[in-house]
Every structure is written in C-alpha cells, then in structure tokens.
Image (cartoon, rainbow, N blue to C red):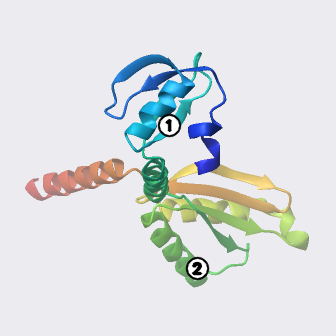
Amino acid sequence: MSANEFRVNEGIRVAEVRLIGPDGGNVGVVSIKEALKIAREAELDLVEVSPGANPPVCRVMDFGKFIYEKAKKEREAKKAQTKIEVKEIRLRPKTNEAHRGFKVDDARRWLGQGHKVRVTVKFRGREMDYPEIALEDLKEVAESLSDVAMIEVPPQMEGRTMLVVLAPAKAGAAKKKEKTEQAEVKNEAEA
C-alpha cells in the first residue's frame, strides 16, 4: 500500500472520529479537532485506518514508520511466495530413446525444483494418422518420472499436439513409496 491510500492529519474531512491513542488504547469518539490536538501533543500523525466505519477509525501513530513497516511486510510476503513455473519438454513421434532420455533427465531436475512439467508431442503431416505412437511415448516418459512426479493432466490432444502435464509428487508420498520398496527388499532377503 502506498501513502496515498491513507488520509492523514488535515486530509481527514469528517466531524467526528473513533480515536485509538498512541499506546493502542481506545480513546473513544472525539471531534476531529480534538483528535488532531492529541496527535500534535504526542508529536505523531493522525491516520485514518478504517474509513468505512461509522464514525471512521483513526489512530495516532508515526505515519512514516507505519508505511515503512507495511512495505517491509509486503516485500517479505512476496519473497515467501513460491512461484510454480511450468517447464516444457517438446518431443516428436520420431524422437529416439537417447534424446528422450536427456529430456527426461531435464524434467526430473525441474520436478525436483518444484516446477510442473508439460510434455508435448507435436505432429506434422501424416504423423497425425498414428497418435498411438505419441501416446506410448508420453506414457513411457510419465512412467520413468513416476518416482518424482504424478500426472496432473492425462494425455490429451490439442490440435496437432498431444500433451501430458506432470506435477511434483508430494515428498511424503515419495518417501512412503521408498520405505515400502525397502521393506519388500528386506522381506525378500529374509526369505
């Protein structure tokens, strides 16, 4: 929020306000002149914090400090937000195993970083006659990434493109799967 969004001191144009004092205590409903006088005596500003209330709620505070702290909180909240990006792997029906392996490795890295991965197979010309080849490729890619990803959007056609969207698997689910695999190996070793 910017400083322009708050009415301060003489910018408050009402007859009476509900005043919150500099210590945070409720002073009560007072005239605007009385509120301004209290703010000046405390060498602080009178800030309208809730203009929609009847009467509007005003607070005696250091306005510059208030704006600074509000901006600081917003910056920290923005940093804390995680941005999920959708990365894309483009394949063709004729993409060979080795090349697909490199792309799967990239997808594994992106999924590990928390990004979603969209795998697309683009058709040209007569390749549209054999969509089952692309479907098989997408299923193989999804299966090879099943330890770190789950299918968010199943394979589907969009024009001349077949796609599948993979999202990072939940950490708990991957660990649970790993534990069950270890338990199976242990059981086989004991048998």
Specify the amino acid type for callout 2.
Glu
Question: Horizontal and vertical percent for residue 124?
Answer: 86, 72
Q: Residues within 10 Å of mark 1 (few under 14, many from 20)?
A: many
Find residue 97 and name its label.
2
Residue 165 location (% of width, % of height): 62, 56
Q: Which mark is residue 112?
A: none
Three-letter amino acid code at the position of disc 1: Leu
Residues at marks 2 and 1, CA–CA distance in whole angstroms: 70 Å
Q: How many marks?
A: 2
Q: Secondary structure at mark 1?
A: strand
**Label 2: few (<14), some (14–19) or many (≥20) C-alpha neighbours in 10 Å:** few
* Residue located at (85% from left, 64% from top): 128
Dot 1 corresponds to which residue?
46
Residue at 53% over, 33% down: 49
What is the residue that sits farthest to the right in this orientation? 125
Residue 68 image position (x, y, % from top left): 46, 55
- N-term-proximal mark, 2 vs 1: 1
Q: Is residue 169 above or below residue 98?
A: above
> Could you tell me if the residues under marks 2 and 1 are in contact, i.e. CB atoms within 8 Å?
no
Q: Quadrant of residue 120?
A: bottom right
Is residue 15 rendered to the left or right of residue 71?
A: right
Residue 74: horizontal and vertical position, in percent? 49, 52
Q: Is residue 93 left or right of residue 25?
A: right
Disc 2 secondary structure class: helix
- Judging depth in this view, the residue of 165 and 69 nearest the camera is 69
Q: Is any atom of residue 73 visible in this view?
A: yes
Q: Nearer the viewer, residue 56 or 159?
A: 56
For the question of whether residue 168 can be seen, the reply is no
What residue lies at 73% left-to-right and 51% top-to-bottom?
156
Of circles 2 and 1, which is in front? 1
